Image (cartoon, rainbow, N blue to C red):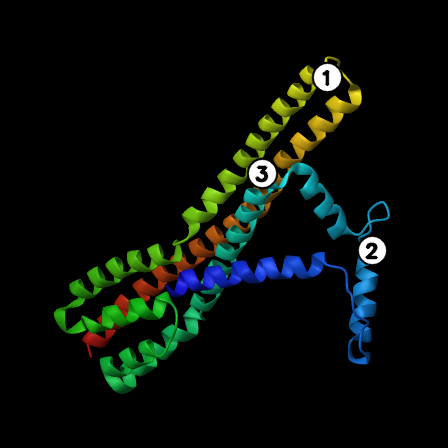
Amino acid sequence: MKKLFLILTVALFSLGTVNVFAQEPEEAATPATEEVATVAETVVSETEIAGDSLHHVLMQKFLEGGWEWMLPVLFCLVVGLAVVIERILYLSLATINTKKFTQNVEEALNNGGVEKAKELCRNTRGPIASIYYQGLDRYDQGLDAVEKAVVSYGSVQTGQMESGLSWIGLFIALAPMLGFMGTVVGMIGAFDAIQAAGDISPTLVAGGIKVALLTTLMGLIVAVILQIFYNYIIAKIDSLVNDMEDASITLVDLLTAYNKK
C-alpha cells in the first residue's frame, strides 16, 4: 500500500507540474520572485519554436493528434515516470558504502560479538545489511545455515529491487501500440473523408495523415524516454546484486574467522 500510494502521489504531482507549466501566468510577479521570473523568461525565449513557446507547441500537437488517443499515451508516460522515480528512489536508498559497512561489521564482531554485529545491521538500511542480519541471526545453527540464509534472502532482496519493472516494460510496449492504433484509426478516418468528398484533395489527405502520425510519434517518444530509465534501473540493480554477492562471501569469511577464535 505504501508503494502504491507513493506511485499515485508522484503521478499526481507530475500531472500538476505539467498543468502549471502549461498555463500562462495571470498575476504580476512580486519583488521576491522577479529574479526567478527573469530566469524563466530567458529559458522560455530560448525554447521558442516558430514564435510559439515549447509547451504551447506540444499542447497544440497533442490536441491535433486527438485527445482520445493521445491521452492514453500520456497516461503511460506519467504513470511510467512515477514508477521510474519510485524505483530510482528505492535503489538510491538501498545503496550504501559496502566496504565501510563490512569493516564496521568486522569491528563489531571482534568487539561485541554476533549480537553487536546484528544490532549494527538492524540500524543500517539497504539489502546488504538485511542479508548480513539474516546470516548473523543463524550463526548459532552453523556456517551451512548461514550460507543458505544468505543465498535465500539474497534472492528475496533481488526480487524486491526488481519489483515494478514489469509495469515499466508494459508501458514501453503499450505506448507505441496505442500510437500505432491511433494512426490506423486516423488513416481510416482520412480515407472515409476522401470517400465522402468523392475527390482526392492533397490538403485533405495531408491533414489526415499528419494527424494520424502524431499519435505514433507521441507513442515512440514515450517508449524511448521510459526505455532509457528502464536500462538505467537494470544497470543499477545489477550493480547492487554484484555488491550483495561480494558482501555475502565476505560475511561467510568473517564468520569463519570469528568461529576459529
Mark 2 closeness class: few <14, some 14–19, many ≥20 residues within 10 Å = few
- Residue 178: percent from the left, percent from the top? 54, 36
Select label 3 or label 2 by which is in front: 3
- Residue 31: percent from the left, percent from the top? 82, 80
Who comes first in sequence, dot 3 or dot 2?
A: 2
Who comes first in sequence, dot 2 or dot 1?
A: 2
Determine whether, in the image, residue 51 is placed left or right of residue 239.
right
Who comes first in sequence, dot 1 or dot 3?
A: 3
- Residue 149: percent from the left, percent from the top? 22, 63
Give the amino acid at mark 3.
Trp
Kind of element beneath mark 1: helix
Residue under the image location 79 percent in, 70 percent down: 27
The residue at which mark 1 appears reads as 197
Select label 2 or label 1 by which is in front: 1
Kind of element beneath mark 3: helix
Residue under the image location 27 percent in, 61 percent down: 153
The residue at which mark 2 appears reads as 46
Determine whether, in the image, residue 44 is placed left or right of residue 17.
right
Give the amino acid at mark 1.
Ala
Foreground pick, 237 / 68: 68
The residue at which mark 3 appears reads as 69
Q: Quadrant of the N terminus?
A: bottom left
Q: From the viewer's perspective, is residue 214 above or below residue 8?
A: above
Determine whether, in the image, residue 169 is placed left or right of residue 246.
right
